[in-house]
């Protein structure tokens, strides 16, 4: 199976793969070449994930700027039941 490019993966997919790579590297059972290959892949996944987080933060910031006139309001349950 061909490995997806990190920039073409969802944030969740990259995070899951990065977690697997970190676990493999922490075990210390890999040969040097495999460890280096995994480390490089992990760096690429981390950078792509950070880019996605930065983009999401920028989108939220833009949305919040468009709501400057909005005032915060208390949350009220419509059902009259305040338990969760």
Image (cartoon, grey):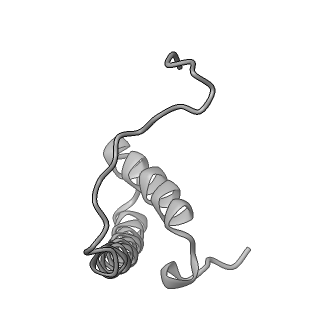
User: Is residue 51 rendered to the left or right of residue 7?
Assistant: left
Q: Position of residue 3 (x, y in %)?
A: 62, 77
Quarter occupied by residue 41:
bottom left
Q: Which image quadrant: the N terminus?
A: bottom right
User: Is residue 3 rendered to the left or right of residue 33?
Assistant: right
56, 35: nearer the viewer:
56
- For the point 51% across and 16% down, the residue is 83
Q: Position of residue 43 (x, y in %)?
A: 32, 73
Work out which residue is located at the far right of the displayed protein and give it. 1
- For the point 36% across and 41% down, the residue is 27
Classify 80 as above or below 58: above
Classify 75 as above or below 50: above
Q: Position of residue 75 (x, y in %)?
A: 41, 39
61, 52: nearer the viewer:
61
User: Is residue 46 rendered to the left or right of residue 34?
Assistant: left
83, 35: nearer the viewer:
83
């Amino acid at each position: 199976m061909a490995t997806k490019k990190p920039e073409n993966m969802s944030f969740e997919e990259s995070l899951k793969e990065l977690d697997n790579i970190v676990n493999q590297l922490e075990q210390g059972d890999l040969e040097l070449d495999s460890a280096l290959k995994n480390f490089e892949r992990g760096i690429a996944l981390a950078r792509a994930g950070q880019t996605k987080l930065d983009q999401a933060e920028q989108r939220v910031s833009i949305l919040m700027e468009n709501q400057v006139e909005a005032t915060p309001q208390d949350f009220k349950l419509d059902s009259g039941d305040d338990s969760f």
